[in-house]
Image: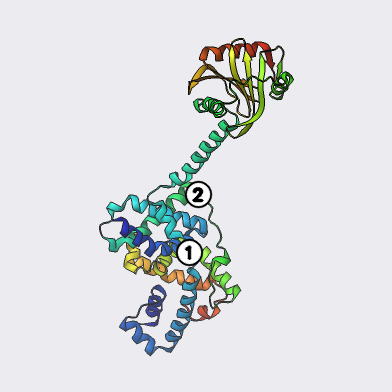
Amino acid sequence: MDCLTYRRTKLATPQDASQEVIAHAQECLECAAFTRQLEAFEQDLHTTLQVPVSEGLAEKILLRRGRPRWFRTTWLPVAAAIVITVAALVAFNTLPSRDGFALQFVDHVLSEPNIIGTNTEADPTALKLAFANFGGQLQRDIGKVQYLNQCNIGGVDSTHVQISTRSGDAALLLRPGRSASIDTPEVHEGHAVVVVSVPRGSLAIVAATPQQASEIRSLVLASSEFRG
Amino acid sequence: MKPDNYEMIVRAYSADLFRFAYWMCRNRWQAEDLVQETFAAAWRARDSLREESAAKAWLFSILRNEHARIYQRKRLEIADTEIDDIPATSFSGQERVELVDALNTLPEHFREPLLLQILGGFSGHEIAKTLGISEQNVMTRLTRARQALQRMAGAQSEYRKTGLS
């Protein structure tokens, strides 16, 4: 082996330890020196190339198993869009499932059985004030206010009014926040409920029958004006 | 390929593939992405791997294809290597910078076989198969790659003194 072949061989494969290569290095001092320099360079080159690997890379790969790029790049925005949409629906009180919404008013009435049939007269001006707090103006008397208090309905501080009207007794529940409207009475647990959307929330009317609920709703709407 | 074997292969080769990818695209995040994409493609095509002893070469081929697909199609900008990514060597700081610069400027047809040899541990014959060129051509490229690195890394005057003229 001549020097040129030896050096080309070592530059291509520095780890080459064939008999020919070893024999030439033993015979040629210049090529032996060349080899020492090359080995030093090679060691630094190897070290330089050994960049640290990202932590947990193998676990990330195993978690992702088989999912193509589009999945990783697409599912996050899609999930984010869903979350944002749901949040927006909640924020703007337009969630379509109103059944649960109506039920919470009936649940509240059932949780206070002592209020139904109360025959004590409450301050009628308090009802006007309660309507005003929800963006409404009570223009005419709608009946005898038997009870009026602040109650927790569905985790929200609300106004509970028990009233006796010409169409029968009812609970008027003014709940701030979500504004929803349920015109056709829903019956839950033997009570009928309709909900009127008002500027600052919802006004639920809970009565004994669907007919009573509808009539009292009409009475309330005819006797008041909501703006906002 | 069974899931257990896949896990074994991931653990065995992900580091080598990451380093190869890093020096191909010179960016940690892109390299990580490239390796993840490589293994995802490997999992999807696992039935095409006949012998698991050939898994390493197979994975490097997939990575090269993914790299070509992503970089050539999207024409992503190739970044400069961050010097902080480079492990400490016996070089001085300036020598390290010069070697990294030399690696960065080394043409891809020289750099790729060199990386396959050093990081992949492949023989000339295996590199030739991966790159689709002759083994003689691989040897020539490896020789020229080291010559070019020694020439470009200005601090390596001692190497140049003893290198091929």
Q: Please state, as top left, top right, bottom left or bottom right, where the C terminus of chain A lies in the image.
A: top right
Which mark is nearer the camera, 1 or 2? Answer: 1
Is residue A218 in view from this perspective? yes
Instruction: Return the residue at label 2.
Output: B75
> Does dot 1 land on a helix, a strand or a loop?
loop
> Does dot 2 land on a helix, a strand or a loop?
loop
Q: Chain of mark 2?
A: B
- What's the residue type where badge 1 is placed? Val
Identify the disc placed on residue B133: none
Of A1 and A11, the residue lying toward us: A11
Residue located 59% across and 76% down the image:
B92
Is residue B37 depicted above or below A196 in this figure? below
Color encoding of the figure? rainbow
Give the image location of residue B148, x and y in percent.
Answer: 49, 70
Of A171 and B157, the residue lying toward us: A171
On the same chain, marks 1 and 2? The answer is no
Mark 1 to mark 2 CA distance (whole Å): 25 Å
Instruction: Return the residue at label 1.
Output: A53
Give the image location of residue B123, x and y in percent.
Answer: 34, 69
- What's the residue type where badge 2 is placed? Arg
Of A63 and B118, the residue lying toward us: A63
Residue located 65% across and 23% down the image:
A147
Q: Chain of mark 1?
A: A
